[in-house]
Each structure stands twice: as C-alpha cells, then as structure tokens.
Image (tube, coloured by chain):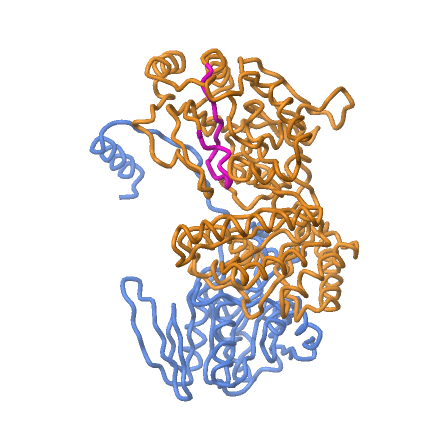
C-alpha cells in the first residue's frame, strides 16, 4: 500500500462523480467548510479533495467502484464526532459522508431487531426504539454520532457493564467493498456457525475494510423501571476500590461510572447549571433496573447498603426524569466540558482489567504531578475503560506536546503491563496507531494487514488508519 | 427562621389518565412524585436554613399515599412533614385547596416564610400559592428567580416577564419560586434511615380549626372541571417554497384563515 499508488481526485474525477450521482451530492474542497478537515478532538487534520454526500447504497457502490479503478482514497464519515482522526481524509481523495442515509428501514418486533441506514443518529434510534417500547442498549455519550460510526469504532458507552458494546447488538451488516461489490454479512438470525464471521471483522475496523450501507441491530423490551444511584466518596481511591466488590455482589447493574469532582465542576461551568451534589471529591454513578417499582426499590436499598458498607459517605437516589436529566446530562457533557475548560487537550481511552482501574487512576495522578500536566479523568469503572484527558491550559505549545508524548508513552506502557489495551471504545484511527503497533507486535499487525489486503487490495479505504 | 414549603404529589409521567365520567385525574396505582417545581422551593428553603439556622417543614394536601411525597421531602432535607388528608378534601379546586393549606399551616404554628413551586405539572394554574397568602393575609410574590434573606425579611428578585423587580419583603410572607432558581438536591439514603413516618403528622378536616366544612373539597369549590382531555396533536406538515416574502404571505394567509390572527 505504497503512497505512490494513490491518486488525488482531480477536476475530471469530481465532474465524473457529479455526473453519475448528481451535483447536489458532490462538493469540491474549495466549497467545503474547514470542519471536514478534522474530527471532534484529535490533532489529525486533512482536507479531502471532494465530499460526496451519499443518499443510497447505490451511491456508495458508484463511488467505491470508481475510486477503486482510479486508486483514489475513500474515507467514510458519519457525524464526524470521532476522537482519534479515523474519519479524517489524511490522504485527500473522497470523503464519503453517510448522514443523508438516515432512514430507519424496519422494526421487526417478532425478531426483535431494527434495520437502519448508517447515517441514523444514535439519539434518533434510541428515541425511535423507546417510543415503541424497546431499548437499543448501547449508550455511548455522544448521542449525535451515527450508527455507522458507532459500528465502525465498536462504540461502548455507559451501559456496557450489563449489555456489552455495539458489537454485541449488531446482527447483520450490508457492506460495500472497494470495487463496488456488496456483501450481506449475518442477518436476523440469533446465531450461526457458518464460516469466518466477517461481520465481526467489519465492526471496529474504522472504515478500513468496507463501507457499511445497512445494519440490523438487536433490541430488547424497555425495562419498565430504572433508577440511578449517585454515590459520593471521600476520595477517588475508595470509590474505585468499591467497584470490583459491587460487580462481585451480583447486583444487576446497568451502568457503573466513576467521576471526579473536577469533571463535575467543569460540567457545571460548561452547562451553566449546578450538579445536584458536588460536595465530595469522587462519585460512582450506578444504574439498576427492575420490572416493577417495588422490585427497583428493593434493588436500590440493597445496592445502597452495599455502597455504604464499601465506604460511601451517602447514596443519593436519582429516580425521576428531572433527576436523571440533571445527573446524566452532566455526565454526558464531561468530554465537551473538559474540552471547554482548557486551551487544547488530547485523550487516552485505555481499557484495563476492572481490578486494575484504581491502580491505573492512581498512576495517572502520580504522572500528572510528575510531568506537570492537568489530567482529569472519568469513565466506565464497571468495564475498566477510562477516559483520561491531558489538558494544555497555560503551557506553551511545544512544552505541552512534549509532556503529552511523555504522558501517553507512560500510560500506554502501564496499561499494557496491567494487561490492558490502547483503546476501550474510541478506536485507533490515526492518533493511536503507533501505540497499537507497539503493543500488539509484528505478528498481529501482519495478520491485520493481510486481512486489510484481502478486503481492499489497493488500500484505498481509509489509508494510514488503525494498522 | 421557620420555613414552610407547600408540596404536591403529582403523577410521575406526563401521560395522565383522566376518569371520563368525573373528569378527575386517576391517581391510583400509577407512579407518583413530588411536583418538580416544588423541589426548587424545597431546595431554596434548605439553602436558607443553612444560612440562617432555622427549620424547614413541608405540608401537603392529598390522599393518604401523598405521605410518600412528604417522606421523600424529609429524605431530601426537611425537618418535619404535615399531611392534610380527608375524603372531604376530595375534588378541591384551587380555592378550596388554598383554604385547606391555610388552615393546615395555621395549625402547625408560626412561619416566617412560606415557599411554593410556581405551579404544578398536573394542574398548571399557579394560583394556589398566592391564594394561600391572601387567605393568611400576608405579603406574597410569584416567580421569584433569586432569593436571599436576613432575620427580618427576604430580598426577592421577581421575574416580571419583561423585566425584573427586586423587592425586600418583610416576614411573614409567601413566595413562589421559578424553575431553575437552583438545582434541587437528591433524596439521601442515610437520611432515609433516620427519618421515617414518625416525623409526619397527619391531620383531617376535623383536626383543623375549620369554620365551615362545606367550604372544603368539592362543595367548597366554585370552579368545577367540566372536562379534561389531552390536547389535540397536529402532526401534518406543509412545505412552502418561494421567496421569504411569498412564504411570509402564505403563512399570514393560513394563520388568518385559521383565525389565529
């Protein structure tokens, strides 16, 4: 996959695409907003030569067939809310946006699944399902992300501790390969043992193997009653140390998040709204659900007792819609809030075994002091996935860059030592490639590159990403 | 400072069922919560208590199960609760409700400040608070969006719609507070272990120094609900194209035809 093999999309290519697809779907770089040159966070940037706003799977086929012939790079993009540069056209070429492919095609109540186009937003799918009395369990914080994007990064989210991640909820995919062939992977069936599971290769491949044009996702009946417990602790160590015991207890937890007061304060500042309680240095946020008020209440009391026994200073009940909004909207705004609190930042999304979360947080705090960086964190304590932010604040750019590299280097080494991995849910994209290669080693990287070559012999799909 | 907060138990969801025969809201069997607007009043009271070292009581008129709302208020931070419950209170309109609350508050003692939410989510009249104040013969202000107090009076920033009025109001007085005057604190599990129904006093109409029982409940209500029904939802859409002026003309013509203007 040499650089020489790629072509830029020139005026003739753009004219061809406009002729085939309709000019309203094709925008040359000169008329594009700078927003298309980056994603939500990473320092990765690159302007495509042309943006194609696909409206159907056929549009995707047209683009892929042409790009394959002409050796033009293609980067699929949803809402552009990624954090590692995966949906940035670092080699120019075609940026293939799927936001107009935003139809919910079918609700199959007998097979408990929904068929969607890739540009449906997570919040649209959630609202659609809840309106019909169902739950699509994956709950990443970024609700304006597309389902296509969620599948491409194997997004996790707040309910992973109980329900798993996006991968666990995808039954089938329709994927267009470079060259324009369309494959249907999986389907509505509950299980199969029919050859390699190519669907699972596509999930989490960050647009390097094919472009998703349709997805069949699983749903479940909406649990009638759910409530959360906001649990204050005197320090972060006690809070995190309570996590393994909470999981071992057998309580049926839907979510188990941790947050430090600094993240809460940033959210208060960002949202212009006070959090219901910010008097403690650290909090756990748990969600339980039951099939009746009485059952949920019994679960609440048992979980509350357990938390008190594990050193919580109190337990606050988050039961009504207003209370859930006050707590969970702040939790959902942490990333944006921390971003707004500093001049520049980068993030580390490591995942470690749950038993190591407390030690890892302690390590980042030590690192913050040692290197001289502000490093607030929050994350999914229940599944070992941490979101650690490295904030520039008043540091000169070169000093920040230097400390950032030191901190990343140290944190990824530490995570690997603990048996963790580079990314829990945000993906590798462009920003974390070096750390992935370093940790996985040459054999695994060779296997991944071979797989990539099998799907995409000319390497036109999202070059310079992941592997 | 002695503060009384008036609270009401309301249905937990906005999907309220109505008894078609009587027009009364069906409350049995459905999940209930404290009227969300009242939580701002309770929080404002608790904040004043922290600053001035007083006590905060809560009062509610409602069926026996409204005790749960008072209990939750205790778990949030109130010191004592009073439930006014009697079959003869059933069917109260805003005036009869205000009469019952007035009598109930008088039976509880002297209060410097009475706080209410600006309205309820099930009735939405915003009248009960001011009516209680009128019946008690005390000063009152509605839609307070900021509040401080000293030992003699409150200083209230009142949302007047097109402006803000800042007024010093001497005790005793009643205020209804705006949504978002604060962020209400959450019910505490630790408080739930120490605060129980013992801290709630239940009073019937007979316990109150009520002048004439006919002034309460349905018989004491000059307004009767004729019919309650969910508002019609219009989901149809019309798309217009053209210049801004053409579209504005079309919009005007439609609004005029529908008699909105």
Where residue B93 appears, as percent x and y from the top left, is 49, 65
The residue located at (68%, 68%) in the rendering is: A312
State the extent of the magenta-drawn residues as a range: A71-90
The residue located at (48%, 32%) in the rendering is: A87
- In-front residue for pair A271/A430: A430
B92 vs B4: above or below: above
A429 vs B154: above or below: above
Q: Is residue A438 rendered magenta in the image?
A: no
Residue A271 sits in which quadrant? bottom left
Q: Is residue A75 rendered magenta in the image?
A: yes
Tint applied to chain A in the drawing: orange
Where residue A232 appears, as percent x and y from the top left, is 62, 66
**A69 horizontally vs B199: left or right:** left
Where residue B62 appears, as percent x and y from the top left, is 60, 68
**B21 horizontally vs A272: left or right:** right
Where residue B15 appears, as percent x and y from the top left, is 56, 49
In the rendered image, the residue lying farthest to the left is B245
B217 vs B13: above or below: below
- In-front residue for pair B125/B221: B125
Tint applied to chain B in the drawing: blue
């Amino acid at each position: 996959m040499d650089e020489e093999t790629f072509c830029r999309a020139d005026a003739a290519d753009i004219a061809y695409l406009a002729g085939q697809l309709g000019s309203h779907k094709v925008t040359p770089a000169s008329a594009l907003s700078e927003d298309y040159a980056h994603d939500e966070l990473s320092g990765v940037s690159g302007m495509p030569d042309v943006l194609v706003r696909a409206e159907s799977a056929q549009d995707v086929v047209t683009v892929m067939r042409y790009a394959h012939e002409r050796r033009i790079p293609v980067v699929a993009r949803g809402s552009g809310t990624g954090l590692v540069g995966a949906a940035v056209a670092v080699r120019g070429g075609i940026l293939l946006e799927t936001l107009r492919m935003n139809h919910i095609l079918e609700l199959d109540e007998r097979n408990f699944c929904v068929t969607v186009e890739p540009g449906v937003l997570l919040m649209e799918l959630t609202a659609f399902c809840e309106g019909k009395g169902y739950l699509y369990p994956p709950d990443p914080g970024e609700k304006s992300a597309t389902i296509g994007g969620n599948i491409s990064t194997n997004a996790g989210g707040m309910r992973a501790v109980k329900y798993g991640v996006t991968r666990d909820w995808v039954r089938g995919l329709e994927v267009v390969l470079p060259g324009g062939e369309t494959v249907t992977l999986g389907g509505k069936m509950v299980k199969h043992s029919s050859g390699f599971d190519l669907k699972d290769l596509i999930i989490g491949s960050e647009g390097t193997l094919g472009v998703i044009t349709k997805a069949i996702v699983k749903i479940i009946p909406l649990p009638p009653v759910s409530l959360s417990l906001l649990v204050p602790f005197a320090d972060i160590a006690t809070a995190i140390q309570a996590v393994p015991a909470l999981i071992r207890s057998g309580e049926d937890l839907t979510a188990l998040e941790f947050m430090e007061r600094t993240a809460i304060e940033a959210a208060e500042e960002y949202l212009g709204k006070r959090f219901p309680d910010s008097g403690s240095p650290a909090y756990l946020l748990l969600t339980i659900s039951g099939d009746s008020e009485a059952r949920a209440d019994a679960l609440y009391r048992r979980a509350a007792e357990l938390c008190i026994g594990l050193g919580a200073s109190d337990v606050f009940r988050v039961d009504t819609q207003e209370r859930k909004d006050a707590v969970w909207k702040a939790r959902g705004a942490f990333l944006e809030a921390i971003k707004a609190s500093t001049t520049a930042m980068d993030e580390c999304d490591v995942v470690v075994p749950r038993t190591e979360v407390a030690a890892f947080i302690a390590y980042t705090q030590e690192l913050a002091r040692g290197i001289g960086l502000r490093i607030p964190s929050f994350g999914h304590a229940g599944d070992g996935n941490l979101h650690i932010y490295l904030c520039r604040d008043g540091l000169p750019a070169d000093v920040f860059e230097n400390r950032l590299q030191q901190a990343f280097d140290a944190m990824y080494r530490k995570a690997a030592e603990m048996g963790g991995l580079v990314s829990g849910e945000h993906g590798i994209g462009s920003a974390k490639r070096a750390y992935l290669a370093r940790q996985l080693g040459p054999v695994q990287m060779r296997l991944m590159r071979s797989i990539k070559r099998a799907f995409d012999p000319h390497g036109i799909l999202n070059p310079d990403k992941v592997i | 400072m002695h503060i009384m907060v008036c609270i009401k138990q309301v249905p937990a969801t906005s999907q309220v069922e109505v008894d078609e025969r009587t027009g009364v809201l069906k409350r049995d069997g459905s999940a209930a919560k404290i009227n969300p607007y009242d939580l701002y009043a309770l929080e404002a009271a608790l904040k004043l208590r922290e600053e001035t070292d007083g006590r905060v009581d809560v009062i509610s008129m409602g069926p026996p199960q409204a005790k749960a709302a008072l209990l939750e208020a205790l778990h949030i931070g109130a010191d004592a609760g009073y439930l006014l419950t009697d079959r003869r209170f059933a069917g109260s309109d805003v005036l009869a409700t205000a009469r019952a609350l007035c009598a109930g508050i008088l039976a509880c003692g002297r209060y410097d400040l009475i706080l209410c939410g600006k309205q309820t989510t099930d009735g939405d009249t915003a009248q009960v608070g001011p009516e209680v104040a009128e019946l008690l013969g005390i000063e009152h202000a509605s839609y307070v969006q900021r509040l401080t107090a000293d030992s003699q009076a409150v200083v209230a920033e009142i949302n007047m719609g097109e402006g803000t009025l800042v007024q010093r109001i001497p005790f005793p007085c009643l205020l209804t507070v705006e949504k978002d005057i604060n962020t209400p604190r959450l019910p505490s599990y630790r408080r739930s272990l120490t605060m129980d129904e013992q801290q709630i006093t239940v009073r019937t109409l007979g316990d109150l120094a009520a002048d004439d029982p006919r002034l309460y409940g349905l018989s004491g209500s000059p307004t009767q609900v004729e019919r309650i029904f969910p508002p019609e939802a219009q989901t149809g859409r019309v798309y217009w194209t053209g210049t801004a002026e053409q579209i504005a003309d079309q919009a005007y013509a439609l609004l005029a035809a529908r008699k909105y203007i």
